[in-house]
Image (cartoon, helix red, strand yellow):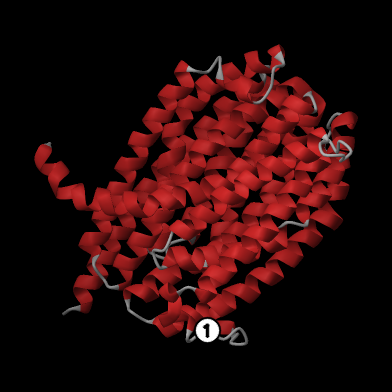
């Protein structure tokens, strides 16, 4: 056992050093919505909290499409950097920039012309819908700065520079919390804005984060070798296609997974506003640990992509195994915390006793699916590093939309198990995804070994 640890120790250390800042950066996306839920839950009440849950269910689907497209550059940058091709990295950046600008505009239009109308037909409490609409509109305006921020963040992370995005995210979230409290509660002469206040704070936060991250990448000496080749006017179909061939499937993976959880929120809304608010509390806590696990997955993508780029499959496999082991350890710890403190954690978000009781029960279930959630997101990260995204996309669709959400509907609604039944279905979907993605990794690594060995002959 000690011998194995010594063998993998350099890989543990390297992965943790890279993953640490990425974990905090990834967590930042969730902390924005978590902070919104906490502030609204305490200062505005249960109906506004349910409105935040409804908007997050709708907006998260749109947001992860954008983040998935932006993510398409990261494994490509990691692979080209492994080949020491700095010029190609710069060309990929310019193409990613314009692709993400276009995506941000299209996603805003999708929210403005689609979601704002669809939200009236989701069988939700009318009082919740009334609170949700203005918040959704303001939040949609933040898509464009978020996409530009993600362009430069994913470029830097693909090269292994992760700390600056972490610092920007930390300060951005501090600013978001301060502004949200001021706007929601109404301080310093500002009229209380309620739910709209957290929308404005998020918009301002993302504009500033975009400005700082873009300035850092374009001005820092760390990127001189790459940025000297950077020309914003260099756009071509080949690079657009390369980024989209990874980014679009990654976006769909996010949509299938987050969409299933959004669907679960909508199902919860058909039970009651209390069930929906309870779901929001529990899912926000689970989302925080998920985003931290996705930081490990992002590090796995970078390390695996770099190893794949210089054709070092031995190193690739070691980083993949290390990432699986680290995420299992992390998720075991968080699952234990959920089980031990399940009756106390909901109070972070609300003092409504009915919401706290139900959310505490959901956290016990969340403790179980933490393990599957962590291993499935690492599986996706490892496969992305190898450029394998199409089959994993099909796996996520099957896991969440053929197995997870339908079984949640059957157990929660038809069998009348309530919100717990919906969460049992989600757990089953995560288990399916985790197992199939691991089997896919084993199949792909064997295939790549065979290909690389034959290419040497």
Number of on-image labels? 1
| Image x and y of residue 242, in percent | 51, 75
Near-viewer residue (173 or 309):
173
Specify whether 145 is left or right of 249. right
Local packing at callout 1 (Cα closer than 10 Å; few below 14, some 14-19, many 20+) is many
Q: Is residue 451 above or below residue 188?
A: below
Disc 1 is placed on an element classified as loop
The N terminus sits in image quarter? top left
| Image x and y of residue 191, in percent | 89, 38
Which residue is found at the position 11% from the left and 38% from the top?
A: 2
* Residue 223 visible to the viewer: yes
Near-viewer residue (297 or 185):
185
Residue 34 picture quarter: top right
The C terminus sits in image quarter? bottom left
* Residue 246 visible to the viewer: no
| Image x and y of residue 432, in percent | 46, 38
Specify whether 345 is left or right of 437. right
Which residue is found at the position 56% from the left and 52% from the top?
A: 169
| Image x and y of residue 234, in percent | 58, 87
Residue under label 1, please give it.
230
Q: Residue furthest front?
A: 188
């Amino acid at each position: 056992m000690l011998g194995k640890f010594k063998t993998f120790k350099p890989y543990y250390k390297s992965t943790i050093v890279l993953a640490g800042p990425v974990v905090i950066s990834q967590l930042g996306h969730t902390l924005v919505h978590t902070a919104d839920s906490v502030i609204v839950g305490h200062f505005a009440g249960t109906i506004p909290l349910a409105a935040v849950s409804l908007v997050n269910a709708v907006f998260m689907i749109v947001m992860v499409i954008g983040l998935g497209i932006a993510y398409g550059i990261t494994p490509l940058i990691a692979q080209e950097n492994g080949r020491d091709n700095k010029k190609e990295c710069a060309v990929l950046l310019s193409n990613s920039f314009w692709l993400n600008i276009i995506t941000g505009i299209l996603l805003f239009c999708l929210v403005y012309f689609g979601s704002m109308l669809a939200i009236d037909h989701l069988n939700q409490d009318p009082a919740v819908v009334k609170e949700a609409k203005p918040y959704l509109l303001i939040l949609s305006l933040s898509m464009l700065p978020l996409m530009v921020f993600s362009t430069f963040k994913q470029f830097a992370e693909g090269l292994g520079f992760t700390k600056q995005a972490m610092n920007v995210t930390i300060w951005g979230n501090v600013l978001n919390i301060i502004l949200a409290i001021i706007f929601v509660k109404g301080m310093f002469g500002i009229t209380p804005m309620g739910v709209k206040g957290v929308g404005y704070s998020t918009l301002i936060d993302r504009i500033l984060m975009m400005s700082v991250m873009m300035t850092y990448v374009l001005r820092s000496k760390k990127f001189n070798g790459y940025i000297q080749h950077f020309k914003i006017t260099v756009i071509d179909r080949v690079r657009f296609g390369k980024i989209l061939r990874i980014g679009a499937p990654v976006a769909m993976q996010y949509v299938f997974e987050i969409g299933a959880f959004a669907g679960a929120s909508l199902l919860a809304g058909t039970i009651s506003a209390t069930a929906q608010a309870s779901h929001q509390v529990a899912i926000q806590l689970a989302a925080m640990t998920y985003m931290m696990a996705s930081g490990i997955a992002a590090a796995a993508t970078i390390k695996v992509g770099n190893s794949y780029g210089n054709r070092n499959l031995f190193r690739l496999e070691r980083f993949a195994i290390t990432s699986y082991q680290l995420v299992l350890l992390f998720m075991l710890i968080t699952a234990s915390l959920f089980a031990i403190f399940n009756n106390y954690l909901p109070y972070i978000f609300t003092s409504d006793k009915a919401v706290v009781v139900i959310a505490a029960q959901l956290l016990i279930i969340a403790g179980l699916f933490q393990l599957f959630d962590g291993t499935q997101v690492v599986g996706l990260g490892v496969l992305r590093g190898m450029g394998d995204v199409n089959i994993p996309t099909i796996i996520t669709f099957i896991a969440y939309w053929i197995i997870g959400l339908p079984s949640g509907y059957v157990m929660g609604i038809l069998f009348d198990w309530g919100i717990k039944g919906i969460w049992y279905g989600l757990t089953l979907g995560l288990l399916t995804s985790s197992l199939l993605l691991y089997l896919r990794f084993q199949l792909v690594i064997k295939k790549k070994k065979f290909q690389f060995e034959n290419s040497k002959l």
